Amino acid sequence: MIRYRSEPNQKWFGLFDPSVLISPVDQDQFLEAIQSARPDLAFDPAGNLVSKDP
């Protein structure tokens, strides 16, 4: 999910930050490609990519 704002404090329906969902055909390959480009990221126990630095 990519969250963005074109105006400060912009919300959809007054509640949600505007966002776009990206869903690749092969999620595992997509995450591995991101990790190879960003070695500062690692997989957490749930399988999400997170920063290695706290």
Image (cartoon, rainbow, N blue to C red):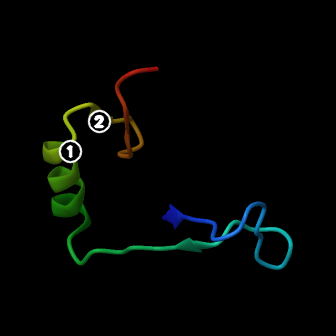
- The numbered mark, 2 or 1, whose residue comes first in the sequence reads 1
**Amino acid at dot 2:** Leu
Q: Name the residue under label 2.
A: 41
In this rendering, the answer to whether 2 lies above or below 33 is below
In this rendering, the answer to whether 32 lies above or below 5 is above
Crowd class of label 1 (few under 14; some 14 to 19; many from 20; radius 10 Å): some
Name the residue at 83% across, 79% down. Answer: 13
Q: From the viewer's perspective, is 36 left or right of 52?
A: left
Q: From the viewer's perspective, is 2 left or right of 28?
A: right
Q: Outermost residue toward the front?
A: 7
Which image quarter: residue 5? bottom right
**Amino acid at dot 1:** Gln
- Numbered marks: total: 2
Q: Outermost residue toward the right?
A: 14
Where does the image place residue 10, in percent across and percent down from the top left? 76, 68
Where does the image place residue 43, in percent across and percent down from the top left? 31, 38
Which image quarter: residue 35? top left
Q: From the viewer's perspective, is 13 left or right of 31?
A: right
- How far, Cα to Cα, is label 2 from label 1? 6 Å
Crowd class of label 2 (few under 14; some 14 to 19; many from 20; radius 10 Å): some
Q: Mark 1 points at which residue?
A: 35
Where does the image place residue 45, in percent across and percent down from the top left? 38, 35
Seen from the viewer's position, the closer of residues 28 and 1 is: 1
Seen from the viewer's position, the closer of residues 9 and 35 is: 9
Name the residue at 49% across, 64% down. Answer: 2
Label 2 with label 1: CB-CB less than 8 Å? yes
- The circle drawn on residue 14 is none
Q: What secondary structure is found at the residue carrying circle 1?
A: helix
Seen from the viewer's position, the closer of residues 4 and 7 is: 7
Name the residue at 28% across, 74% down. Answer: 24
Q: What secondary structure is found at the residue carrying circle 2?
A: strand
